[in-house]
Image (cartoon, helix red, strand yellow):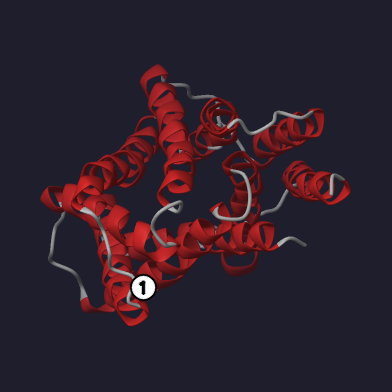
Amino acid sequence: MRKGYALVFLAASMWGTLGIFAKLLYGYNLDPFTIVFFRASTAFFLLLLYNNFRDDLNLKKDKLKFYAFYGFFSVFLFYVLYFYAVKLSSVSLAVLLLYTAPIYSTIMGYLIFKERITPMKLASLGMVLVGVLFVTELNGSVNIVGIILGLLSGFTYALYGILGKIAVREESPGEALMYTLGFGTLFLLPFTKFSIPMGAIPYLVALGVFPTFLAYLMYNHALQDIEASRASIVATVEPVVALILAYLIFHEVLSMRQIFGASLIIFGALLLQYEESISK
């Protein structure tokens, strides 16, 4: 398997643990803004150490506006839109709308980077979208504002990969991520509560290390190797991992519908790797 695909798969697998961390941290009555602030700030501190050790701190002043834009839309606004989409609709519907991101990535990848839209890429995209639909158990409640916010969260999620593709042209993956999370942390700061129970601290640290610092670092490295649209499609394995972990840890019921959806997502992601292997 090509290195970029493996890195996206590992990153998405770590993102699949977010639901586990959320359940554990909500048990301490922490609000989402506080959780994501400590998630971003912990990862930022680790990246500061990481980049300082690698001597990768060479940001030009003219790039500050770019990273402020990147951090606002792909960290702060993404978290805010997703949080309110969950609040106004449901977790399942919010997840489903979030994973419209590959559609936006495919369109923007074509317009900005001239990434080809091949029949096999479209087939893969169709499979993962149908797969997410099957994996996600929807209820009957529908909120129009929640749907709009969910669609916008998918757009800001896709924007992370597009802007990341631009960022890693000049900065290293770790440096680009550090600046992005740094600005995202600043935008989240006014909404954060700092009274944290001692028992929650290990989970907040783990949240900052695994599905943030390591996962995004791997994803940024992957963007140096593969198309942004392909990375976005492969990243849809995240809800599959979340589903499996929920089954193993919390003993949540895994239906045949969800197993079928998970299979479609994995097959669709593998189809992209197959296409690239036969095109060489």
- The residue indicated by pointer 1 is 203
Q: 254 left or right of 34?
A: right
Q: From the viewer's side, name the closer residue of 108 and 17.
A: 108
Q: 189 left or right of 20?
A: left
- Taking the spot 70% from the left edge, 53% from the top edge, the residue there is 254
| x, y percent for residue 167 | 40, 49
Q: From the viewer's side, name the closer residue of 146 and 166.
A: 166
| Residue 212 in sight in this render | no
- Taking the spot 13% from the left edge, 64% from the top edge, the residue there is 194
- Residue 23 is drawn in which quadrant? bottom left
| x, y percent for residue 259 | 77, 49
| x, y percent for residue 49 | 29, 78
| Residue 23 in sight in this render | yes
Q: From the viewer's side, name the closer residue of 199 and 165.
A: 165
Q: Residue furthest top?
A: 144
- Residue 247 is drawn in which quadrant? bottom right
| x, y percent for residue 162 | 47, 40
Type of amino acid under label 1? Tyr
- Taking the spot 27% from the left edge, 64% from the top edge, the residue there is 58
Q: Residue furthest right?
A: 278
Q: Is residue 247 above or below residue 118?
A: below
- Taking the spot 38% from the left edge, 58% from the top edge, the residue there is 171
Could you tell me which secondary element the residue under label 1 belongs to?
A: helix
Q: How many marks?
A: 1
